[in-house]
Image (cartoon, rainbow, N blue to C red):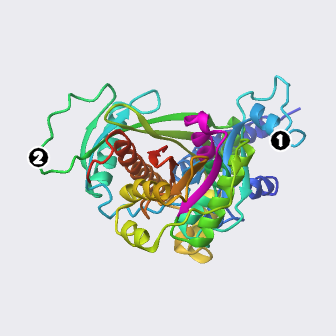
Amino acid sequence: MIAWAPAAWADPMPNLFHSRSELRGWECEDLSMREGARRYPGRVVQSESRAVDPDRRLVVCAERWLRPGVRDPREDAILSELKATADGLARAAASTRPELRSRNWLVEVSYPVPLVSGKLGFAVKNALVDDGLSVSDRHPALAAGDVSVLARLPPLDAWPAACFRWRDSGALGPRDALLAVALLDPRETALHAGLCVDGGWSWLR
Amino acid sequence: MVTPARKGDLLTSRLAIVPLLGLGLAAGGGCVVHTYQPLSGLHRPVVVDPTAPNLADVHLTVRCLTGPYVHTSDANVLCRKVALLFENQGALVTTSLGGPPDEEEDRSEGPAEPRPIDLVVELRARKIHEASPPLGWVAMVASFSLAPAITEFTFEQELRVRDANGFLLSEDRLRGRIVYWYGFGTWASNKLLDATVRESADEVVGDHANRALSDDLYAQLSQSVFDARMQARVLDRTATPGAGR
């Protein structure tokens, strides 16, 4: 029992030392020893001895920054993958329309929570800059009448209409390209992206 | 030099061990605690409520692919349960085990009906790793099941959602780990903790692991399919701009 106790404490399973609820706050992944030695050099040592089972696996766990339940689940899902999401959106924009690389890029985010909206916008702009694009902090404005009409449209129709109005009102010029990031339904955890160029709208994902 | 009387005592004591060993095995074999640990993807935050009509405009085909880890009967059961999960959310569901889906029948019901979204959900499970150290079993028998023997395995549930044209809308790999602890010592200590210290949500002995795995799996399936539904709507709008919904 004494020899078993340290192993039990280290094993991220419900046991004498950790409850199931507590362990839900850990992020764990299962790796081969080879992969573990590659990702954690010096901490995981892959033995070359024939006596050691070559198929041994490793479980690597890290405690989450925030316990489950502290943040809204949708925000938790989106913000925990923020960098990957932002990089993916920027890559989709830059690779789908490579001829727009010389344009001035603007970012608009439609998300119900202003704080998260700000984080998303900042992350996407950073990702575009990392991709070598020129990014502006300017937000294209719309007249109050346009806003009241667009607010009554479903999101899938509102964005193309807004793009058209930005071009007509001069808020977006021929040297500009706008990447929009939108949450189209409060029940989803994946964000959508669209491109507004010269009054024409296209959904990227 | 051993006297005949001592020889007999030695023989008797050795023979006495056999039924005790058998008792240890029998006691250990009936006392099993199994625990479940979610790995990649299985305990991601979920927003969708699986009891709400999230998929009312969706025709769903669920394909449960068989393999070395999932036999036909298991795939059948999984398909039925997953079909019920999505039917409860308002989807019209058909199931198939492996192979290409059957020919699509004409589902149009008149010019005024909005076009439903056709999705195909493919489920494939595989075992990543399994271990059952023999020394653990020896220790369990030798200690009359006070020390546990352990069997663990890591599984992966692969989920793919495609639209009617076969375009991949979303792909997910959900990994988890199941550990079986055999032995009276482990069973009794956990039973005692369940009865005295642990809250009901943290109890270990019983069917809690299966229920937790089912809850996690069905929640992730619901969220992935809903996200794919939204993606399909966006792509459909891209293909047919101006199409009313």
| Residue A139 image offset from top left, x and y in percent | 60, 63
Residue B21 appears anywhere in the view? no
Answer with left or right where residue B53 lies relative to residue B34.
Answer: left
Residue marked by disc 1: A40
Marks 2 & 1, CB-CB < 8 Å contact? no
- Between disc 2 and disc 1, the foreground one is 2
| Residue B144 image offset from top left, x and y in percent | 65, 50
Residue marked by disc 2: B111
Question: Could you give the CA–CA distance between mark 2 and mark 1, rounded to whole angstroms?
Answer: 60 Å
Q: Secondary structure at mark 2?
A: loop
Magenta extent: A88-110
Q: Tell which residue pokes out farthest to the top in this image.
A: A50
- Report which quarter residue B192 is drawn in: bottom right
The residue carrying pointer 2 sits among few (fewer than 14), some (14 to 19) or many (20 or more) residues within 10 Å by Cα, namely few
Name the amino acid, label 1: Tyr
Which residue appears at 80% of the width and 29% of the height? A52
- Report which quarter residue B191 is drawn in: bottom right
Q: Secondary structure at mark 1?
A: loop
Name the amino acid, label 2: Pro
Residue B145 appears anywhere in the view? yes
Answer with left or right where residue B196 lies relative to residue B70.
Answer: right
Answer with left or right where residue A117 lies relative to residue A61.
Answer: left
Counting labels gives: 2
Which residue appears at 36% of the width and 56% of the height? A157
Answer with left or right where residue B172 lies relative to residue A80.
Answer: left
